[in-house]
Image (cartoon, rainbow, N blue to C red):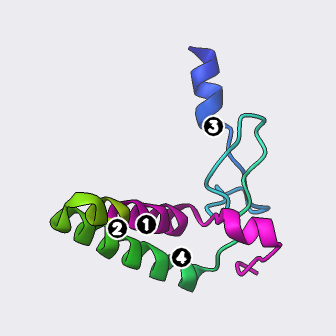
Amino acid sequence: MATTASRLTDYPMTHQGVRNLDQPRQTEGGNPVPVNVGPNERAISAIGGGALAALGLARGGWLGLGLLFAGGSLLLRGVTGFCAVNQAVGRNTAR
């Protein structure tokens, strides 16, 4: 039980002693996954991804499945602030 409590409190902190919400994800090693998507881009990705996912659910079929997958990917990108494509090309818009 003690390991569960330590995992729940093991998150990055700012220098003010507050939880750092700019680094929301953790890897197994405890190193945060970098946020490499800026706040405006995150909001647009989350809203657009939600709309695409809803359209995919309404559409159905193979096209709907593709729209659902694309929308889910954009939604995940907006929520986490991490983009694997940005990381691969060395781009960081969160600065």
The three-letter code of the residue at mark 1 reads Ala
Kindly state the secondary structure of the residue where label 3 is placed: helix
Query: Which residue does the image show at 76% across and 81% down from the upper left?
Result: 95
Whether residue 37 sits left or right of residue 55 in the image: it is right
The percent coordinates of residue 21 (x first, y second) are 61, 61
> Upstream in the sequence, badge 3 or badge 1?
3
* Callout 1 touching callout 2 (CB < 8 Å): yes
Q: In this view, does 31 lie above or below 22?
A: above
Residue underneath mark 2 = 67
The single residue placed furthest to the front in the displayed view is: 62
In which quadrant of the rendered image does the N terminus lie? top right
The answer to which of 3 and 57 lies nearer the viewer is: 57
Label 2 or label 4, whichever lies nearer to me, is 2
Label 4: few (<14), some (14–19) or many (≥20) C-alpha neighbours in 10 Å: many
> Upstream in the sequence, badge 3 or badge 2?
3
Residue 90 included in the magenta stretch of the image: yes
The three-letter code of the residue at mark 3 reads Thr
The percent coordinates of residue 55 (x first, y second) are 24, 72
The percent coordinates of residue 51 (x first, y second) are 30, 75
Kindly state the secondary structure of the residue where label 2 is placed: helix
Residue underneath mark 4 = 42
Query: Which residue does the image show at 34% across and 67% down from the upper left?
Result: 67
Residue underneath mark 3 = 9
**Highlighted magenta segment, given as a residue range:** 68-95
The answer to which of 66 and 4 lies nearer the viewer is: 66
Label 3: few (<14), some (14–19) or many (≥20) C-alpha neighbours in 10 Å: few
Alpha carbons under labels 3 and 4: distance apart: 26 Å
The percent coordinates of residue 64 (x first, y second) are 27, 64
Residue underneath mark 1 = 70
* Callout 1 touching callout 4 (CB < 8 Å): no
Label 1 or label 4, whichever lies nearer to me, is 1
Kindly state the secondary structure of the residue where label 4 is placed: helix
